[in-house]
Structures are given as structure tokens and as C-alpha cells.
Amino acid sequence: VDTDTEIALIERPPWPNEAPAPKQKAPDTLGSLLVVEDNEDLRDHLASLLAPQWVIHTATDGLDALDSLKAHDVDVILSDIMMPRLDGLALLEKVRDDLSTSHIPFLFLTARSDDETELKSLMLAADDFLRKPFDSKVLELKLKNLSMNRQRLQAYLDQMPPKVSAPPTDGTPEPQIGSEQTLSKQDLSPRDHRFLERLTAWMETHYSNPELTVANLAQAMAVDERTLQRKTRALFGHTPAYFINEYRIRRACEALADPALEIQEVAYQTGYNNPRYFSRVFTKHRGQSPTQWRKNHPK
């Protein structure tokens, strides 16, 4: 019996099974964009203009947008401010207050040109602001930048666990994402920052538990599993199961630096009660076996 067949015959382990890593986008798009605009002609124009670069969802006002956010995974929101039933500012506030959507970049496109409105939108954590009438190229570039910034943050957060710090108050420049193992609170919404801190602390305490499941993690974060799925995909680009395994593998890499530890000891320490399965997961995540990793990364 070959190795893969033997592993398949082993009783399903209690730890999370491997899952595909990143959420897949439609080919040649920047992601999913929700366009919130009560003017039908302008809404159709924006959808047509941006469709080559984005998977488009549309909403007629803030309430319609909230329904769309429940039905679709959205990467960026483009919204008017003055709308019936629920205006753009109220929509933004609800988006930032909901853990399942608090990470979504938000761009206002509005005819309101007063500084007070722009200030209020930024205070509510809008990511950008563009006044009507607008240059289509400027709009396209702003949306692309929001998408790229989110991807850079996602790539950085994937190097978990980073240190999350408050912004400097002495006038010194803040480190850029990826330049140091430091993440400013300004790079995340307050709700996302709290979620990340709780997630890091809980994983650090429980990653060695072989009984750990995605359901356990969701319960610890006080969310349902669907919200956890959306959140980990948004923050790290991975499913919760993949995230748990990746966290363990990072800890395994640290443990492998100690030549006194046997490979099976490292497996048990990092939550894998089957060393063969540990080796298989490690190889998938690092492209080499634990033995090869230890040889290539001497202490």
C-alpha cells in the first residue's frame, strides 16, 4: 500500500483538514465591487464603466446595500452619500460596526462638496472620497489603489503573528506595511484590530491542542462559522482551517530550529497527534519536509 493510501486509511484526525488557500477572484478582475447609488442612470454607468476590472454588485440605497453584503463577499464598496432610507454615512457606520464587513475598503462618490461632510466620512473611517462630477480615470485608479492596499495588508497579516502597535506619538515616521514586523492600529478598523488581537492571543494558547477545530475557533471569537470564514479570508486570504494549520506550521518551524527535538516531538507540540500527517501538511505549506527544512535552516 503506498503512503497516500495508508494516510487515507487512517481515521480522520480531529485537527482541521487542509483547504484551498486564497479566495479565488474572477479572471482579470480586481475583485468584487458593490456600487451603491440611487440614481439609476449613474448606477448603470458606473457598473458599465467598472465591469471590465471588477465583479459588480449594485444597490439602490444603504438598506439595499446591507442586504447585498449579506448575500455576497465584497472586496470594495463605492457609495453615494445622499440616498433615501439609509444614506451613505449611515451605511458606512453600519459596515464598520459589523465584524463581517468592517474590513471592506469604502470610497465615497458624492455631489456634496463641503469639507464638513468629507471630514465626517473620514472620521467614520472612509478610505477615500471623490466629488462629483468625477474623472473616470481618477475613480478607476482610486479603486485600484484600495484593492492593492488591501492585498498588501492581507499579505502582511498572512505573516502572523505580527506585533500590533499604537501609532507613534513623538513625530517619528510610521513603518510601512511589510518593512518591519509592526502593524499600526491605523491600518485596521478598531473592530478588526480587536479581532486580530483576540485571535492571536487565543491561537497562541491553543494551537498545540490536537482537538482544536474551526468550530472551537469560531466560538472563541464569538462569531458563527460563516463570519469566521469571511473574516479570515478577508484578513489573511485563507480559510480558517488553512489559517490554523499555517499558524501551527510557523510554530513548528521555530521548534525545528532545536536539533535536540525529534520530528515527532515537534508534531505533538504543535497540535498534530499523527507525525505522518504533520509531515504531509508541513510539506504542503513549506514545499519541503520537516527534515529538509531543518537541514536548510540550521540554528
Image (tube, grey):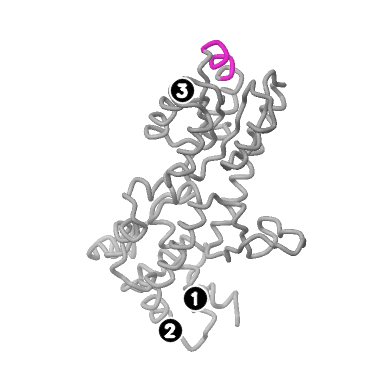
Q: Quadrant of the N terminus?
A: bottom left
Tell me which residue sits at (41%, 31%) in the image.
66
Between circles 2 and 3, the one closer to the viewer is 3
Q: Callout 3: helix, strand or loop?
A: strand
Residue at position x 42%, y 49% from top?
20
Going from the N terminus, do you reach mark 3 or mark 1 first? 3
**Quarter of the rendering occupied by the C terminus:** bottom right
Residues 39 and 71: in front is 39
| Secondary structure of the residue carrying numbered label 2 | loop
Total residue callouts: 3
Residue 26 % position (x, y): 50, 32
Q: CA distance from mark 3 to mark 1?
A: 53 Å
| Amino acid marked by disc 1 | Thr
**Magenta range:** 40-46
Graded by Cα atoms within 10 Å as few (under 14), some (14 to 19) or many (20 or more), the crowding at tag 1 reads: some
Amino acid type at image mark 2: Glu
According to the image, label 2 marks what residue? Answer: 262
What amino acid is found at the position of numbered circle 3 in the picture? Ala
Q: Is residue 133 above or below residue 23?
A: above
Quarter of image, res 107: top right
For the point 27% across and 65% down, the residue is: 13
Residue underneath mark 3: 59
> Depth check: 9 or 282 in front?
282
Q: CA distance from mark 2 to mark 3?
A: 57 Å
Point out the tag, 2 or 3, that comes first from the N-terminus: 3
Specify whether 220 is left or right of 171.
left
